[in-house]
């Protein structure tokens, strides 16, 4: 979503870094570049003005305190990073839990904003943390909304309170009230109320939302807004804030290619934090919104914290520990281990999204876009067509075994050969690493180490890797590891 903005920021800073010593004029020019970039990204003028004024002022303050141009450029970069985090809302805010359960979360927003999908995402998120959420179907307007909530609730594995058929039938306020009473009686600790949207924030929408609000007294009213609609997102949020009020924003469709202005304007203009972000149609495409991580992405530093969290979730403790012990004991990394890692990676979501979180991902955009997701499945099929002996000891793989594996996995013998060659090379590399200590992907950024499962990943087979330039050897370890693939 922020690709354009990111590359503009990168341009502004590379110009600044090329200066031996930074002057006030340079700061003026950088500020002007940033101002232009934000306006092009559809950020509200009011927000842009305040932002650029602050970075200009603060940059001028740090300038005389430092000698070298490099340090000055870094200090200005830090100023921009801080201010960007600030306009995105500062720190992440969590849902406030009620003293006496259940905690009631009311979702509101326009039709099509993604409320129903989000209700299930939220429920799944809390369920995974040991809570016992229930969904309440108070969107009795949108055709099929009740049924849709039931379907997504089922995939999230959470109950849905839906006594009315919807499609214009039933009283949404009563459903919400009854839903809370039901949740109390069944000891659910979180109730998520899905309400009806309209095409615009109009009288009808507000009246219904106010009635539900007053009847159930939610602990949190979350305004769900489609980030793809740009400045309109901010306008609807403000209208809803004036009419009904809300506690936090949820931005959906951040996976889209809109310019990102909504995300950068909404917290500053409504004074309400962005609490969650939705980045796709799948229930797992969802996370807490961390302003500092988003700022980091926009500035091309990636989002290693989220990547590490996802890896931790996908690579269960036992697998990681087993691998680490094997590594330390000097045992060979086998194709069985590789298979386990491929499976864990599939659990983490699309490779494109994962690679997009690496520092410098902006410059690898083309490769990331060209990454063929199904290649992982195909690679898995080759490994799965091998016998346990073959997976342990690649040396037994003669011609006829390779032909059998190719047939079994629906691939060509040359694909099997390529995987075997790559894997043998990876095993060798790991042996060298063991001798020399240190793993390639460790300490990717700001002293972060990925969980043990990640660094051990051998390079993907050649055909699975994005097209790469031979010559460049990046100074960025994560990027270099990819290049070496
Ligand atoms: P509601 O009318 O507010 O309940 O909206 P829905 O939950 O039905 O969502 C409207 C459409 O947007 C559906 O097709 C969803 O699959 C899709 N959608 C929801 N969230 C996202 C998201 O984060 N990214 C993308 N790409 N699509 C989304």
Image: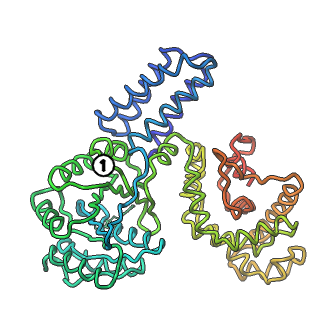
Residue 193 in percent (x, y) is at 26, 71
- Residue at the spot 36% in from the left edge and 78% down from the top edge: 153
Image location (x, y in percent) of residue 71:
61, 25
The quarter of the picture where residue 45 lies is top left
In the image shown, does 136 or 485 lie closer to the viewer? Answer: 136
Placement of 39 over or under 95, stated as above or below:
above
Q: Label 1: state its secondary structure.
A: loop
Q: Residue furthest front?
A: 99
Q: Residue 101 vs residue 4: left or right?
A: left
Type of colouring:
rainbow
Mark 1 residue crowding within 10 angstroms, few (<14) / some (14–19) / many (20+): many
For residue 120, above or below residue 20: below
Residue visible at 13% across and 66% down in the picture: 211
Looking at the image, residue 80 lies above or below residue 320: above
What residue is rendered at 88% in x and 56% in y? 432
The residue to which callout 1 is attached is 272
On screen, residue 135 versus residue 399, left or right, reads left
x then y, percent, for residue 31: 43, 25
Residue behind label 1 places its C-beta within 8 angstroms of ligand 1: no
Residues 281 and 71: in front is 71
Please identify the quarter of the rendering in which residue 46 is found.
top left
**Does residue 250 sit above or below 212 in this rendering?**
above
Judge by depth and name the residue closer to the eye, 450 or 8: 450
Quadrant for the C terminus in the image: bottom right
Rendered-image quarter of ligand 1: bottom left
Residue 395 in sight from this viewpoint: yes
Residue nearest the viewer, comparing 90 with 485: 90
């Amino acid at each position: 979503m922020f690709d354009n903005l990111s590359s503009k920021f990168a341009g502004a800073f590379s110009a600044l870094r090329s200066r031996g010593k930074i002057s006030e004029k340079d700061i003026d020019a950088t500020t002007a570049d940033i101002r232009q970039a934000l306006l092009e990204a559809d950020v509200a003028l009011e927000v842009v003005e305040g932002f650029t004024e602050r970075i200009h002022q603060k940059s001028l303050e740090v300038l005389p305190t430092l000698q070298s141009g490099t340090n000055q450029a870094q200090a200005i970069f830090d100023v921009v990073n801080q201010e960007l985090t600030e306009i995105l809302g500062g720190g992440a805010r969590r849902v406030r839990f009620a003293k006496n359960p259940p905690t009631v979360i009311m979702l509101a927003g326009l039709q099509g904003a993604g409320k129903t999908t989000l209700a299930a995402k939220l429920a799944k998120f809390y369920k995974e943390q040991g809570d016992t959420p229930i969904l309440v179907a108070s969107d009795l307007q949108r055709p099929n909304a009740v049924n849709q909530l039931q379907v997504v609730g089922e995939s999230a594995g959470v109950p849905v309170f839906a006594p009315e058929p919807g499609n214009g039938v039933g009283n949404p306020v009563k459903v919400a009230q009854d839903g809370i009473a039901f949740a109390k009686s069944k000891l659910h600790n979180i109730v998520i109320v899905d309400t009806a949207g309209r095409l615009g924030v109009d009288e009808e929408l507000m009246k219904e939302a106010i009635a539900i609000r007053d009847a159930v007294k939610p602990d949190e009213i979350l305004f769900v807004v489609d980030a793809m609609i740009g400045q309109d997102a901010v306008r609807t949020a403000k209208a809803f804030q004036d009419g009904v009020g809300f506690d936090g924003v949820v931005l959906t469709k951040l996976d889209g290619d809109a310019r990102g202005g909504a995300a950068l304007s909404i917290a500053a203009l409504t004074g309400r934090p962005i609490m969650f972000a939705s980045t796709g149609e799948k229930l797992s495409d969802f996370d807490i919104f961390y302003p500092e991580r988003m700022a980091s992405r926009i500035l091309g530093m990636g989002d290693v914290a989220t990547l590490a969290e996802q890896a931790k979730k996908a690579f269960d403790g036992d697998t990681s520990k087993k691998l680490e012990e094997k590594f330390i004991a000097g045992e060979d990394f086998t194709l069985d281990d590789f298979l386990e890692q491929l499976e864990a990676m599939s659990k983490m979501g699309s490779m494109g999204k994962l690679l997009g979180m690496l520092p410098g991902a902006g410059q690898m955009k083309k490769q990331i876009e060209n990454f063929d997701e199904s290649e992982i499945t195909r690679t898995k099929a080759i490994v799965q067509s091998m016998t346990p002996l073959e997976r342990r000891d690649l040396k037994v793989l003669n011609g006829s075994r390779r032909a059998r594996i190719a047939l079994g996995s629906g691939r060509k013998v040359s694909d099997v050969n390529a995987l075997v060659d790559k894997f043998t090379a990876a095993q060798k590399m790991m042996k060298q690493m063991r001798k020399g200590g240190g793993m390639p992907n460790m300490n990717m950024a700001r002293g972060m180490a990925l969980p043990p499962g990640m660094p051990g990943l051998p390079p993907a087979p050649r055909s699975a890797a994005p097209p790469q330039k031979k010559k460049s050897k990046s100074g960025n370890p994560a990027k270099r590891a990819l290049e070496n693939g």
